[in-house]
Amino acid sequence: MDAEKIKSLQVTAANVRLGIVTGVGGGRFDPNASLSRQDAALMVQRALNQAGISAPDGNAAALAAYSDRGRVADYAKGAVSGLIQQGLLPTSGGRISPRNNLNRGDMALLLHRAMTR
């Protein structure tokens, strides 16, 4: 096993211990899979809370203004609405696009907002 693979496994194990990631189901992890915007929101929320930075679940009213609010998975609604209410999760054109892949620019903006608020 090469050093990069070992480091990836160590980082994944640390994130599991901290409760930041839970895998893709069935006890499996797929570090090469794309990351949806809703899953990124959940991971950022968990990381902030783990770091002692308040990132509570939001409420359903925060999603009401978005035409695609029904596409947010039940498991991610609290995190997505919370990050929207806090102004952390970028949205565009009245859409959350929760199941779209998170692009690098949006991830950079999300992390910047989270760490500088």
Image (cartoon, grey):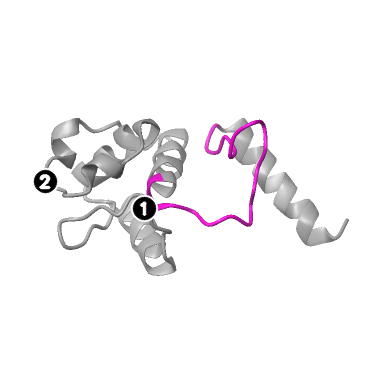
Numbered label attached to residue 86 = none
The residue labelled by disc 1 is 115
Instruction: State the image quarter where residue 4 is shown.
Output: bottom right
Q: Is residue 32 left or right of residue 54?
A: right
Let me know if residue 36 appears in the view.
Answer: yes
* Quadrant (top left, top right, bottom left, bottom right) of the N terminus: bottom right
Asked if the magenta segment contains residue 32, the reply would be: yes
Residue at (42, 65) in percent of width and height: 103
Residue at (78, 56) in percent of width and height: 5
- Structural crowding at the residue carrying mark 1, measured as other residues with C-alpha within 10 Å and reported as few (<14), some (14–19) or many (≥20): few
For this orientation, the residue located farthest to the bottom is 105
The majority secondary structure of the magenta stretch comes to: loop
Residues in magenta?
Answer: 19-38
Nearer-the-camera pick, 26 or 48: 26
Picture layout, residue 85 above or below residue 110: above
Let me know if residue 55 appears in the view.
Answer: no
Classify mark 2: helix, strand or loop.
Answer: loop
Q: Residue 79's x, y, as percent?
A: 33, 37
Residue at (41, 34) in percent of width and height: 49
Q: Residue 90's x, y, as percent?
A: 27, 57
The residue labelled by disc 2 is 65
Asked if the magenta segment contains residue 26, the reply would be: yes
Instruction: State the image quarter where residue 106 is shown.
Output: bottom left
